[in-house]
Amino acid sequence: MQEQEVEISVVASLRDISAADWDACACPETQGGARPRDPFTTHRFLSALEESGSVGTGTGWQPQYLAARISGQLIAVAPMYVKSHSQGEYIFDHNWAHAYERAGGRYYPKLQIAVPHTPATGRRMLVRPGFEQTGTAALVQGAVQLAENNRVSSVHITFCTEEEALRGADLGLMVRKTQQFHWQNDGYGTFDDFLASLSSRKRKNIRKERAQAQGFGGSIETFSGDALEPEHWDAFWEFYQDTGARKWGTPYLTRRFFDIAQETLRDDMALVLARREGRWVAGALNFIGAEALYGRYWGCTEHHPCLHFELCYYTAIDIAIRLGLARVEAGAQGEHKLARGYLPQPTWSLHWVGDPGFADAIARYLEAERDAVDEEISVLTDYGPFRRAEVEEQE
């Protein structure tokens, strides 16, 4: 079957692909009722972005989903967008754009295969089981052919898996290596078990930060599934707007996204809120996958010492331990996560550039960058908070 002719099409809206067909490619592991490996490429999440206006006209993220079929059967899909800027991607190529345009080229629009506004690793070539090789090749070749036919400068596949990066390299794409900070669950039964793995100085510091945060004069609660209520999103929207305005100028997600999330995504989310004197004053939103908890957004209307660390990092660890998850992915950037048990981990992306000279320059840059990232991961890991068997500070 994998040698049959593959038909590639571009779909402008997920309304034109049924949830069952899309998810059979995106998250086949859910067919028996299990959680998706990550919720971000599910039909319900991508549809929430589309239906809420968080992508589409005026956002710089215009959906152009790729679909591959054999004899009418959908065998592979990819969340692809035409981009008119490089915002909301977290794999930064602004310097590439500036260099290309200074040389007289036109970098935008470009094609982006990604989950908008979501720096979380996951499959981007969403292939029905049994069609892995054919489906991946068809999607990559389809995206490149579409770029060439429309004289689009480049194709970017961001936060793909390492396996996809290797397959993409075999298909002629350039591999980029970056890094994030993740917490790994080494079979911990409690937060204290995790603390016991740290050096005494780091252990004491985390206990101090947790005590300081939890003494802010209120309570901290976690809501998921049917425990989530519209009032929680009213509060969180205020936090999200504040953070979005400071980080990006305007928030990426619309208010409508959270209304849709309440209806279709609440089982995929864990919302941590802090209340003081009858008012919600801070919050952190996480998404739940089969193996990982994904920290996404944080905001507050009152500033209290260490409350950010408590809601975003320590409570996330508590949730992951309770749910038996293997790791917490805490999003982009932030070396301050290192002292709190989050170690650097490689992340991957794939790139195609149409101009041969520019592609050669980027390939040389990426080779040097990969070496630098490897060194950075090694150095930062050595600075991590975990105990060394031969030396342990005195209590």
Image (cartoon, rainbow, N blue to C red):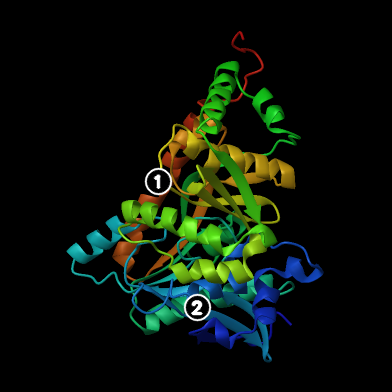
List the single residue furthest toward the front: 277
Q: Where does the C terminus fall, quadrant-wise?
A: top right
**Rendering quarter of residue 267:** bottom right
Q: Amino acid at mark 2?
A: Glu
User: Which type of secondary structure does the marked residue at label 1 adopt?
Assistant: helix
Q: Is residue 102 left or right of residue 80?
A: left
Q: Residue at x 63, y 63 (%)?
A: 266
- Residue 319 on image: x %, y %: 67, 44
- Residue 372 on image: x %, y %: 41, 40
Q: Where does the N terminus fall, quadrant-wise?
A: bottom right
Q: Nearer the viewer, residue 39 or 173?
A: 39
Dot in front, 2 or 1: 2
Would you place residue 165 above or below residue 43 in this image?
above
Q: Residues within 10 Å of mark 1 (few under 14, many from 20)?
A: some
Residue picked out by circle 1: 369
- Mark 2 and mark 1: span between their CA atoms? 38 Å
Q: Is residue 334 left or right of residue 16?
A: left
Q: Is residue 36 left or right of residue 173?
A: right
If you read the primary sequence from the N terminus, does the residue marked by circle 2 or circle 1 appear first?
2
Is residue 364 in sight in this rendering? no
Q: Nearer the viewer, residue 311 or 183?
A: 311
Q: Residue at x 65, y 44 (%)?
A: 327
- Residue 185 on image: x %, y %: 68, 39
Q: Is residue 177 left or right of residue 210?
A: left
Q: Amino acid at mark 1?
A: Glu
Is residue 243 in sight in this rendering? yes
Q: Residue at x 33, y 67 (%)?
A: 356
Q: Residues within 10 Å of mark 2 (few under 14, many from 20)?
A: some
**Rendering quarter of residue 105:** bottom left
- Residue 346 on image: x %, y %: 53, 46
Residue picked out by circle 2: 51
